Amino acid sequence: VKEIRNAGLFQKTMARLRRQGKTVGLVPTMGALHEGHLSLVKAAGRENDVVVVSIFVNPFQFGPSEDLKKYPRPLARDRRLLEAVGADYLFRPEPEQMYPQDFSSYIETGVADSLRGAKSPLAGLTGVLCGRSRPGHFRGVATVVTKLFNLAKPHRAYFGAKDYQQSVIVRRLIRDLNFDIELRVLPTVREEDGLAMSSRNRYLSAADRLRAVVIPQTLLWVHRQLSSGERNVNRIKKMAKAKLRSKVTAIDYFEIVDPETLQPLEKIQLHMQVVTACFIGKTRLIDNVRIHLHG
Ligand code: PAF
């Protein structure tokens, strides 16, 4: 893996590859890589001539009381894993490379949200779910993703479905700002017991790790309920929350939403996304599942 730390050099190197007619796949990450990330890197390798992974713990997407300082940074291990799956380039800038002292331009994905008010039932993609409990988070994500897109100008960009809301917002960003990039969102990779892989799982104590499995189990239960004919969204939500509450420290949100608008559903429909964020101790975990009803 060729590591580049300078943003200007990275941009030039990527431009040279494009001039040589190579297709570029970009996998943006914050490091602490796990099988979920590696599945994105492998897919990028199958679908492009050159695979570029970025590792950047983006300060702008962390709230003041969140885990920016203690976010895991196991760099030597990350490099070994990238080597093993055949990534070609690692872009690993210092924060000053990405955000000079007088940095002052941001990508606001929630303009419609702020016009309507985040509490409005019509609040858009960023005023709901994670955007509600992490104000500014998606502005930070959209800003850094835009910068990475402009630096790498990849043909394809790879994101995991575990961060479902993020993937919907990035899709909207690509459309709204006319990025000529194919968005690839790949399935969540899970541990054997169903827990979605996440860099934050390493914060869990052994006892908390056991409790965390209630999250995928509850999503699966909702999937089974809806697939086997249960029609009452509110009843399912109530029962699912009770299941979660028996094990988790707190539920941030649990919703059944429209997969495109992310608005909570009152009634079932053909396609639905069940989404949740829960605290296990101080660790906040998210997960989601897609439901398609047939006929
Ligand atoms: O999903 C992540 O790891 C981050 O939000 C991303 C997309 C790398 C932006 O910092």
Image (spheres, rainbow, N blue to C red):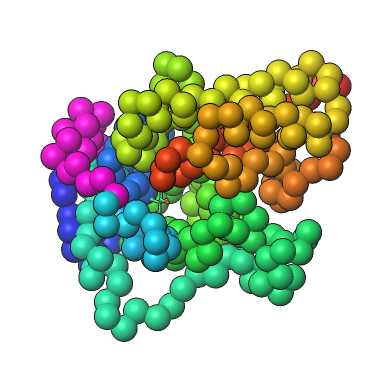
Q: Would residue 265 be visible to someone looking at this image?
A: yes
Residue 282 is drawn in which quadrant? top left
Q: Is residue 26 visible in this depiction of the protein?
A: no
Residue 204, how many percent across, how many down? 35, 34
Please state the horizontal and vertical placement of residue 258, each as a whole percent of the image: 74, 43
- Tell me the quarter of the image containing the N terminus: top left
Q: Is residue 285 left or right of residue 10?
A: right
Q: Nearer the viewer, residue 126 or 179?
A: 126
Residue drawn at x 81%, y 36% is 234
Is 89 displayed left or right of 252 in the figure?
left
Q: How many marks?
A: 0
- Nearest the viewer among 161 and 43 is 161
Magenta stretch, main secondary structure, is: helix
The spot of residue 225 in percent (x, y) is 75, 20
> Taking 119 as reference, is 54 above or below it?
above
Residue 195, position in %: x, y? 46, 26
The residue at 60%/59% (across/down) is 132
Left or right: 187, with 29 as reference point = right
The question of residue 83 being in magenta is answered with yes
Would you identify the image quadrant in which residue 152 lies?
bottom left
- The quadrant the C terminus occupies is top right
Is residue 126 inside the magenta stretch?
no
| Span colored in magenta | 71-87
* Residue at position x 27%, y 62% in the image: 11
Quarter of the figure with residue 15: bottom left
Classify 153 as above or below 274.
Answer: below
